[in-house]
Image (cartoon, rainbow, N blue to C red):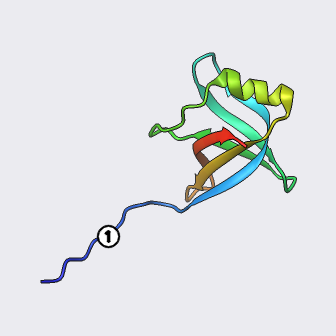
Amino acid sequence: MVVVLFSSCGEPADTVTGVVIDVVGDLTSVTRFTLHTSEGTDLILIPDPAGGFDFPVVHLRAHISSLEPVRVTFRETDDGTLIATAISDA
């Protein structure tokens, strides 16, 4: 008997480091944020709607003023939207 397992991982994840230059959201949630990467590219990222993105808006806004970098793990959807699945201080 042969058992074949398939993984449904979805799109592969990428990781990027940069500084947060814009945050859109209210006091409790982030709608989107812009990351200026170390390569000089600006990426607009949407927090993962399926959850798993637990980084306070206040902390993201603090990164705007401090210019301290963050590391973001994300995946790109078929339509080119960048979905942030994790974020941490870099």
Q: Residue at x 32, y 70 (%)?
A: 6
Q: Does 46 appear above or below 1?
A: above
Q: Residue at x 56, y 55 (%)?
A: 77
- Outermost residue on the left side: it is 1
- Secondary element at image label 1: loop
Where's residue 46, x and y in %?
A: 61, 40
Q: Quadrant of the N terminus?
A: bottom left
Based on the displayed image, in which of its 4 quarters is residue 7 positioned?
Answer: bottom left
Based on the displayed image, in which of its 4 quarters is residue 23 positioned?
Answer: top right
Q: Residue at x 77, y 24 (%)?
A: 62
Where's residue 88, x and y in %?
A: 65, 40
- Outermost residue on the front side: it is 90
Pick the front one: 38 or 28: 38
Amino acid on which disc 1 is placed: Phe
- Outermost residue on the bottom side: it is 1
Pick the front one: 83 or 59: 59
Q: Is residue 60 left or right of residue 73?
A: right
Q: Is residue 80 left or right of residue 6?
A: right
Where is mark 1, residue-wise?
A: 6
Q: Does 31 appear above or below 1?
A: above
Q: Is residue 20 left or right of residue 1?
A: right
Where's residue 45, x and y in %?
A: 66, 43
Q: Quadrant of the C terminus?
A: top right
Q: Is residue 27 left or right of residue 16?
A: left
The crowding category of the residue bearing disc 1, from other C-alpha atoms within 10 Å (few below 14, some 14 to 19, many at least 20), is: few
